[in-house]
């Protein structure tokens, strides 16, 4: 008993000492770190070491929006159900199939010291923020540990893992429980989440310097704008996914990088022939039967005021975990799981000084879901299509499920970067990628599709890519302003180029006294005169978009080849009467919601930010701004995904242009940028919507990259923790 009491007493004494040690370390880090906020609230972090800069950078993120920082890690740790209840349980199971706390902790301990120091600083920065802001109440994560940084090591949250169907997963592992529970899967046909990247060679720019246009299309407020500097060679500026400690899309003094979502094939599904042998499951592989590895996965979920536990037995083949049953076979998925290497690549790219160094980071091959558009001060422009591509036998149908019992379907290592689709300094002097085919990325100087296996690029041409090639072909004397206005914000909606003539042709075929012909005469005349350009005053845009939405609903019933350009397919294959009926429904919807079909796009399409909820709320009765941009689906390069909500008639944007930047790489780097809304997630902050009007007009603010410029525009200077 005495020994127990002694241990308890010692433990009680040690607790405050441990806490004091933490506090002393945090304060010491803070003394080496300075945050300067500029006129738009953008944090410029200066640290003695990279770790100090990471400490200040994540602290500043927490100041701006701790909720989003925490939410991203609740998701990446597979713990959403502990906050939101049973509906997230199977999404958590999906994540926990890959995130084993003991394994990730071991990966942290085995990481190189330099990377470990960054993870330590990251955890310190968040914990110091929570210590100095006791009024902030986390939903779940009251203490962040360094290893947690490895659970979210690549900037596209969810990424490959999100392709796994939660409902299929539940049906396989827990079909009889919560039978009425249906998870709202991500709709891959919804408003596209993609990006645009444009690079201009010196010979096409007025200044003789390379230019880069950085234009991710994400949900709004998904990434803030951050500048981080150290005395160890770090000086990176750009967009950071909330909670991460590296600039995901951005630039330094020497080069810049832009990622676009890729369909380079990084994931495969393997059908397994499974039998129960000696009381355990085995799967056939060649001439043998291999045991499926069984792993207990513990999940937790909130039920009222209590936290309940559910344990699942998850099965793994050598390909990866089993995720569903299909046609009597168990299906396993193979995808990239390289957390420490991915975090290394994500961070080190921000410190590269030339293309050779940048390419060395690409050789780590962990940027699995993205393409990369690159430019630098040496005048190089480069395109990488994908980054993690397994070597496969091309005789198999890799777009679908392959036979996992056949050893010939096994991955045979990874393609080297030089074997992937790659463009360096093309003769035409420009590169574009808009989540479109890489085989038009440099116009006639693009790679040739026949030179590569099909799985290298399932990407199809889209309306944005068609428009980008159209605009950029033959253009020269680029400036930062012309690259922005004439390319990045060029308003033509190329999707409607083939389908409006088909509509007009169908209309002309109607008999003169036909009711639809009489009813639709004026709106048909209006859309026939439309110049295909989206804008706030354009009625033609409203007609086209409402009609286009009706067509997309019709398209679901048509059997089309997977590789068909969708709008040519509609023009060539949709029944004339369906075209007319869809247009009539569009007119009826406009009249029902807005009183007349003759409604300008800006009256419908609005920007509003009144709350900071991750799933935003919108209100017609509150102020909003007209927006001329449009959905990337229709080819709007300046993407703006909007829709009406149950309580609104007007459409409000929630995805598309979020962080946008244009960069010129001369002797000194120059840049301009723009955020949707503003830097802060606090509705009472002056930086919650201070960029909204700029955003609506497409007017970029100057980026303050050099210390003297930061000082000139300084609004506040402080150390983390300082009031």
Image (cartoon, helix red, strand yellow):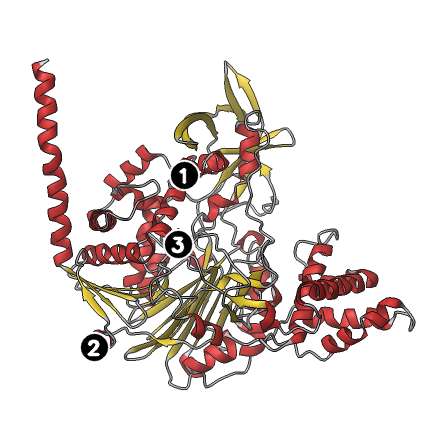
The relative height of residue 550 versus residue 465 in the rendered view (above or below) is: above
Spatial distance from mark 1 to mark 2, Cα to Cα? 45 Å
Q: Nearer the viewer, mark 1 or mark 2?
A: 1
The relative height of residue 223 versus residue 124 in the rendered view (above or below) is: below
Residue sitting nearer the eye, 711 or 470: 711
Q: Nearer the viewer, mark 3 or mark 1?
A: 1
Residue at mark 1: 83
Relative side of 359 to 57, left or right: right
Relative side of 153 to 37, left or right: right
Determine the image quadrant of residue 235. bottom left
Residue at mark 2: 708
Residue 541, horizontal then vertical, whole percent? 65, 72
Mark 2 or mark 3: which comes first in sequence?
A: 3
Work out whether residue 624 can be spotted: yes
Relative side of 470 to 131, left or right: right
Residue at mark 3: 155
Residue at the (49%, 74%) spot, across then down? 488
Residue 567: image tag: none
Mark 3 or mark 1: which comes first in sequence?
A: 1
């Amino acid at each position: 008993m005495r020994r127990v009491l002694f241990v308890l007493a010692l433990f009680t004494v040690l607790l405050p000492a441990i806490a004091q040690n933490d506090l002393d370390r945090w304060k010491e880090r803070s003394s080496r770190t300075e945050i300067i906020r500029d006129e738009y609230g953008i944090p410029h972090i200066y640290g003695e070491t990279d770790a100090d800069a990471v400490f200040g950078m994540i602290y500043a993120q927490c100041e701006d929006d701790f909720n989003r920082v925490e939410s991203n890690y609740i998701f990446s740790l597979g713990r959403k159900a502990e906050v939101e209840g049973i509906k997230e349980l199977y999404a958590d199971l999906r994540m926990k199939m890959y995130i084993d706390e003991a394994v990730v902790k071991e990966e942290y301990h085995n990481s190189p010291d330099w990377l470990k120091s960054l993870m330590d600083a990251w955890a310190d920065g968040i914990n110091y923020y929570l210590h100095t802001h006791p009024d902030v109440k986390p939903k779940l994560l009251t203490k962040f540990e360094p290893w947690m940084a490895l659970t979210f090591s690549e900037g596209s949250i969810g990424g490959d893992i999100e392709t796994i169907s939660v409902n299929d997963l539940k049906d396989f592992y827990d079909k009889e429980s919560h039978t009425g529970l249906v998870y709202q899967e991500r709709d891959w046909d919804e408003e596209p989440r993609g990006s645009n990247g444009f690079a201009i060679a010196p010979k096409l720019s007025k200044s003789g310097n390379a230019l880069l246009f950085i234009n991710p299309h994400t949900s709004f407020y998904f990434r803030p704008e951050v500048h981080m500097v150290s005395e160890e060679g770090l000086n990176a500026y750009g967009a950071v996914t909330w909670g991460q400690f590296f600039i995901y899309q951005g630039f330094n003094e020497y080069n810049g990088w832009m990622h676009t979502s890729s369909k380079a094939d990084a994931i495969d599904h393997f059908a397994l022939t499974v039998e129960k042998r000696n009381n355990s499951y085995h799967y056939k592989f060649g001439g043998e039967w291999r045991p499926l590895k069984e792993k207990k996965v513990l999940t937790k979920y909130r039920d009222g005021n209590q936290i309940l536990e559910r344990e699942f037995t998850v099965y793994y083949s050598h390909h990866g975990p089993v995720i569903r049953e299909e046609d009597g076979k168990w299906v396993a998925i193979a995808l990239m799981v390289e957390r420490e290497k991915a975090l290394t690549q994500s961070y080190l790219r921000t410190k590269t000084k030339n293309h050779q160094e940048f390419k060395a980071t690409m050789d780590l091959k962990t940027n699995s879901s993205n393409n990369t558009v690159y430019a630098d001060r040496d005048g190089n422009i480069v395109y990488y299509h994908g980054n993690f591509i397994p070597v496969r036998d091309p005789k198999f149908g890799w777009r679908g499920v392959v036979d996992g019992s056949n050893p010939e379907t096994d991955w045979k290592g990874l393609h080297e970067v030089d074997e992937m689709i790659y463009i360096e300094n093309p003769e035409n002097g420009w590169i574009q990628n808009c989540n479109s085919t890489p085989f038009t990325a440099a116009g006639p100087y693009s790679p040739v599709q026949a030179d590569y296996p099909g799985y290298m690029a399932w990407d199809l041409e889209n309306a944005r890519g068609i428009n980008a090639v159209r605009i950029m072909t033959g253009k020269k004397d680029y400036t930062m302003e012309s690259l922005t206005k004439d390319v990045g914000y060029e308003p033509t909606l190329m999707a409607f180029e083939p389908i409006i003539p088909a509509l007009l042709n169908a209309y002309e075929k109607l008999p003169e006294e036909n009711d639809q012909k009489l009813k639709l005469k004026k709106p048909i005349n209006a859309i026939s005169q439309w110049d295909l350009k989206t804008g706030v005053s354009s009625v033609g845009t409203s007609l086209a978009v409402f009609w286009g939405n009706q067509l997309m609903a019709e398209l679901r019933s048509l059997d089309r080849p997977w590789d068909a350009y969708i709008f040519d397919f509609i023009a060539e294959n949709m029944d004339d009467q369906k075209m007319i009926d869809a247009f009539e429904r569009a007119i009826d919807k406009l009249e029902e919601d807005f009183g007349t079909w003759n409604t300008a796009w800006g009256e419908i399409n609005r920007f509003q930010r009144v709350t900071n909820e991750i799933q935003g709320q919108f209100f017609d009765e509150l102020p909003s701004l007209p927006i001329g941009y449009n959905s990337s689906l229709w080819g709007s390069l300046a993407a703006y995904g909007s829709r009406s909500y149950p309580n609104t008639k007007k459409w409000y944007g929630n995805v598309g242009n979020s962080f946008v930047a244009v960069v010129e790489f001369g002797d000194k780097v120059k840049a301009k940028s723009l955020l949707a809304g503003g830097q802060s997630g606090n509705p009472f902050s002056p930086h919650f919507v201070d960029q909204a009007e700029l955003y609506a007009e497409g007017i970029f603010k100057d980026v303050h990259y050099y210390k003297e410029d930061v000082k000139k525009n300084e609004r506040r200077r402080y150390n983390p923790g300082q009031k």
